[in-house]
Structure formats: C-alpha cells, structure tokens
Amino acid sequence: MMKMKFAVLILLLCIGAQSFSFAQEATPAAPETKETSESNKAKNDVDNRIYSLAMRYNDASVAKIKLYELMERNPGNLVYAETLASMYFEMEQYGSAALVSLDLLERNDKNLTALEVAAFSLEQLGALERALPHFESLHLLSGDLFSLYKAGYLQYTLKKYDEALNSVNMLIKDNKAAEQKLNFPKGENNGMQEVSMTAAAENLKGLIYKEQGSNADAKTAFEAALAVNPDFELAKENLAGLQ
C-alpha cells in the first residue's frame, strides 16, 4: 500500500513538471530542407523496421528505444507516442503509461487512445479522482458503454452518488447495454461468470441505493438485475445482504 501511494505521489509530481510536456519545445526546430526531409525519411524507415523486428522477437526494450527516436524525429506524429503509451500499459508500467498519455492529451484532449490509457493507468495507480474524468470523456467522445460503466463505478466508489445514479440510469436505458457482457467473480474461487451490462448496471444501482440507506430501492434494483440474469451470483449475494 505504501509503495502504491509513493508511486502515485511521484506520478502527480511528474504530471505537474513542465519538462514532461510535449507542448513545450526546449529550442526552436531548424527549418527542414529537402535533404533533411529525405534523411529523416530514411532514418524513419530503418527505425520502423527495427521496431517491427523487436516486437516480433519480443524485445520490448529495443522497441521502446526506437519509439523514442521516432517521437523525437517526428514531433508532429502522435502515433508513436500512442504506441509507446499502449506498450507501457500492456507491460503494466502504469506510471509511465499515464505520463505519456497525459502528455498526449495536452496536445489533443480528444485523443481516444490517450484517454483510454490514461483512464485505466490512473485507475490502476489508485488515482481514482484523476481517472474518472478520462472515463467520462471517453464515453462522451466514443459512446463506449464500458467507459460509462467504469465512470459510474468510480463515481460510486468516490461517493458521488447522484452522478453514479445518472450514469447507471443512462446505461439501463440504452438498449445496446443488454447486448454487451461483463465478467464478475462467481463465488469464492469458482471462476468468473458473464452477465449483461444492463444487469451489472442494475446491481451497481442497488449498491448506490444501499450506501444511501435506501434499502427498499436497493432491493428493487437487485431484483431487476436478477430479472435480467437470474444466475447473477453477486446480485443474489447483495440482495441477501439486505435482509
């Protein structure tokens, strides 16, 4: 726990440091000539080939170096930074993933890759207040329902109950939620079970009402979750816990 808190502290300090912003240039770039443009293209081709080989041979360290070199040589091309952020996330280096994605968002606050990586990385680091607006933006820009569910769950966790209820009600009213699935733990050491997002939203709604002391409303919500998925074990446990 102390290690996580320290990691979050370092992350937040780094986020505020001006030296980490892509938006700032230490020195003005020299005008590009035909010769330098051709030279850069040749270097890009080599670095892209090396990056591809490194990924093929599972050598992440070399792949990251080539991405940094490509980023430095092509500051206007955000694809390399997006790839680096995603790579850090997949390697579970959430602090680095968050920093890269947040720098990307300084340049383009509608970058969906950066929003997704920032949201999930900050959540993994325990920085829930910082993760929440990225999940909200991701839903607003893409219509992604899982991002809306994540936003609702974080709002519930952060005791923003009115906002959480608004999020889950939006999910429940969306017909597409019934077609999407989420995985939940199935009892103790019994694996996972798949339930519809509508049932998950009803279950979350019950938890919100329970936290607010509205057990009658919570009971109705848990029962609604079970009406959608009768074998939803977590909803069964939550319903039984009200008695």
Image (spheres, rainbow, N blue to C red):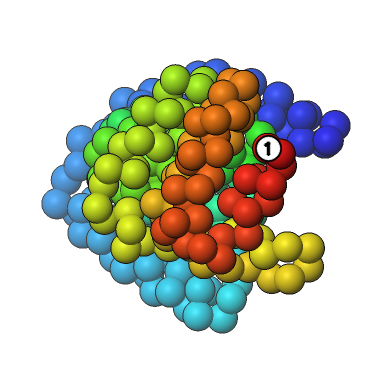
Q: Quadrant of the N terminus?
A: top right
Residue 18, visible in the rendered structure:
yes
Q: Nearer the viewer, residue 229 or 85?
A: 229
Residue 29 falls left or right of residue 160 = left
Which residue is rendered at x = 67% and y = 64% of the image? Answer: 186
* Horizontal and vertical percent position of residue 188: 78, 63
Which residue is rendered at x = 69% and y = 71% of the image? Answer: 191
How dense is the environment of label 1, judged by Cα within 10 Å: few (below 14), some, or many (20 and up)?
few
Question: Above or below — where is 176 with respect to 77?
Answer: below
Residue denoted by label 1: 242
Which residue is rendered at x = 64% and y = 50% of the image? Answer: 93
| Amino acid type of the residue tagged 1 in the rendering | Leu
Q: Residue furthest bottom?
A: 57
Q: Quadrant of the C terminus?
A: top right
Element at badge 1? loop
Residue 110 falls left or right of residue 13 = left
